[in-house]
Amino acid sequence: MLGIRHFTKGYVRLAVSGFSVERFLNMAAFRGIYLWDVVRTGSGAELNVSIKGFKMLRGCARKTKCRTKIILKSGLPFILFRYRRRKFLMSGVLFFVLGLVILSSFVWRIEIEGNVLLRRDEILEFLESEGLHTGALKFRFSDRKLQTAILLYFPEVSWADVHTRGTRTTVLISESIPKQEIYDRQQPVHVVATSEGLITGIVTGAGAPLVRQNDIVREGDMLVSGILELNPEMPGSPNVYVHAYAEVWARRYHSMEFLVPLTYDEKVFTGQVVNQRSIQLLFAGSGRFRLPGGRNSFVSYERITTHRQLGAGGDYPLPFVIVTERYAEFTRVPRTRTHEEAAEIAERLVTSRIIREFDFAVDITERTVSFRETPDALHVSALITTHERIDKQIPITVPTPVSPSTP
């Protein structure tokens, strides 16, 4: 702040020489003249002083018989004086500064941190409904009100903080632990199979089991019934409806089949790169303006797009984004692989599909991969054996009892 004050009011760098330089400095301090960056030299001293203080130093120099010489003039007054006749330049600088002041009244970047379960797009959509979006005026919304609105709207959020600094608004959230599903034990339900499989074990907590170990079931088959007879030995006895519960484990088989070709085209980059740049404005309805230079004439290429938002500082991003599209040329070179190399690729593909398609709770008990070689490709067949739970509950519609008619 002190440096900004000196620059705004202007200052000069003086070289003081003579036989009484120390007396000169003491007299200046006695008169209240502020001096800074004082450095002793062979012939005297060098120092900085404001324009007003420089005029007051003339009396000190005359009484002490010291000589002063201006080494450097610095600050806004000297710059304005230097360019006083260049009116268009000064007008441009004035409009530039005025534009920065106006743009600093808007929000040009919204950052969201801490979200794991909630999607960023979902949070941005809610913030926009509350008045916060890219290009929103800062006085149109309140950080504290936004913080309260987030906590009330999203039950998954246990803590939230919204703070705006400069033209950047940061939303910090902390998500709560998901609530465990609460079952209504008074609701009668059946237990059915979620998929087909060979039953390996069943533990029944309530209800009448209808399957045993080593039975084969299909998707939707009833495993445990929630309807019990009150007295099985008495025909026509009424039924009792219960909340059936059981853990049913089964062995399941999953098959995979795919081809690994022995001939393929490899991308070989030539090293030729073209960069195309454009400016994207974040104003509503604004588009992208392409900058001159760089023209893509490649037939085969890979494109990588990067965005860099311009700013006047860390907390002052501006509504101008430099979009750089990098085109790298490559050629396709025919290659061939052996059956052994194709088998290694097939093993990696099977592993990646298992990781991608199976839940972590599923136990992989066996994996069998077989190959069939042909002149053009390697045919891959994989059989994955899993051990997993296949039970789920479905509600029972309880019939309404019919009251006897009165004569």
Image: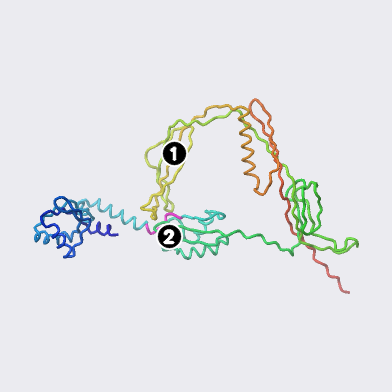
Corner quadrant of residue 340: top right
**Please, what is the three-letter code of the amino acid marked with disc 1?**
Arg
Q: Is residue 19 magenta?
A: no
- Find the residue positioned furthest to the right: 234
Q: Depth-wise, is mark 2 or mark 1 nearer the camera? A: 2
Q: Is residue 108 magenta?
A: yes
Q: Position of residue 314 (x, y in %)?
A: 39, 53
In the image, taking residue 398 as reference, residue 164 lies left or right, namely left
Residue position for label 2: 164
Q: Which mark is residue 213?
A: none
Marks 2 and 1, how far apart in space? 34 Å
In the image, taking residue 212 as reference, residue 61 lies left or right, namely left
In the image, taking residue 310 as reference, residue 144 lies left or right, namely right
Q: Which residues are magenta?
A: 104-110
Residue position for label 1: 326
Corner quadrant of residue 105: bottom left
Secondary structure state at the residue bearing disc 1: strand
Q: Position of residue 385 (x, y in %)?
A: 71, 42
Of the numbered discs 2 and 1, the one sitting upstream in the chain is 2
Quadrant containing the C terminus is bottom right
